[in-house]
Amino acid sequence: MKLQPLPLAFYLRTDVVQVAQDLLGKTLVTTFNGIRTSGRITETEAYRAPDDRACHAYGNRRTARTEVMFQEGGRAYIYLCYGIHHLFNVVTGPADTAHAVLIRAVEPLEGLEYMYQRRGLKYNPQKAVPTKLTTGPGAMAQAMGLHTRQTGASLILPESEVWIEDNYMSVSADELASGPRIGVDYAGVCAAWPWRFWVKNTPFVKK
């Protein structure tokens, strides 16, 4: 059975916390220059405007960088962190909502050799795949070939270079873990919100 990208309705839901949980177990796919890489999503974080101080669109702040967050859900929001790491987010909610889910890690499925090359690692199919290959949002985006030039890209259109496949899999409640988001200490009380979600039974999660 050929898998299809998640439908627009999946992304237009207003509960970004629920969307962040529902993305776990789905398959993130990229295809650049005919090279397909994919991975099972194992870790996410939810960000919600306008009340979440950790969200780039806190207070409905609109800038050249965050403008894509105010578009209709189902688009990529990729920004540069510390001038080095390209971080991949999924825009959710109706237009002008400005919610997003950060994809923090995936479990590699396809295109391993290319993932290693992008990460500057030596590929050896005889050895176990190191968790550092796709764990952490910067490493994950690099391994998948994601870059700020894809920000604003549709995750739904057939000609998209990046999308999330509906593999008809979901993570059960007993497989799901949650806790505070990482690296948002500046966000005051919002820093303690348990809006980071991950799959328990995989090593491909940031410890």
Image (tube, grey):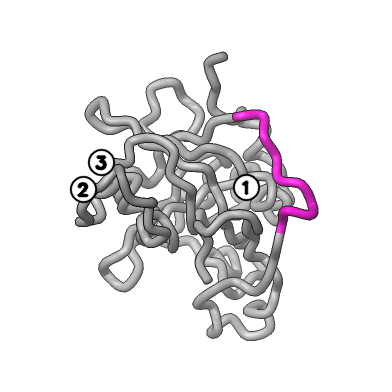
Residue shown at 27% from the left, 30% from the top:
35
Mark whose residue sits in front, 3 or 1: 3
Q: Is residue 37 in view?
A: yes
Classed neighbour count for the residue bearing mark 3: other residues with Cα under 10 Å, few (<14), some (14–19), many (≥20): some
Visible residue check, residue 64:
no
Within 10 Å of disc 2 (Cα), the crowding (few <14, some 14-19, many 20+) is: few
Quick check: 176 above or below 50? Answer: above
Q: Secondary structure at mark 1?
A: loop
Residue of label 1: 24
- How far separated are the C-alphas under marks 1 and 2? 26 Å
Range covered by the magenta-colored residues: 167-176
Name the residue rendered at 53%, 61% in the picture. 205
- Say which residue label 2 marks: 117
Earlier residue among tags 1 and 2: 1
Label 2 and label 3: CA atoms lie apart by 5 Å
Specify the amino acid type for callout 1.
Leu
Secondary structure mostly seen in the magenta stretch? loop
Q: How many marks?
A: 3
Q: Nearer the viewer, residue 53 or 19?
A: 19
Q: Is residue 48 left or right of residue 31?
A: right
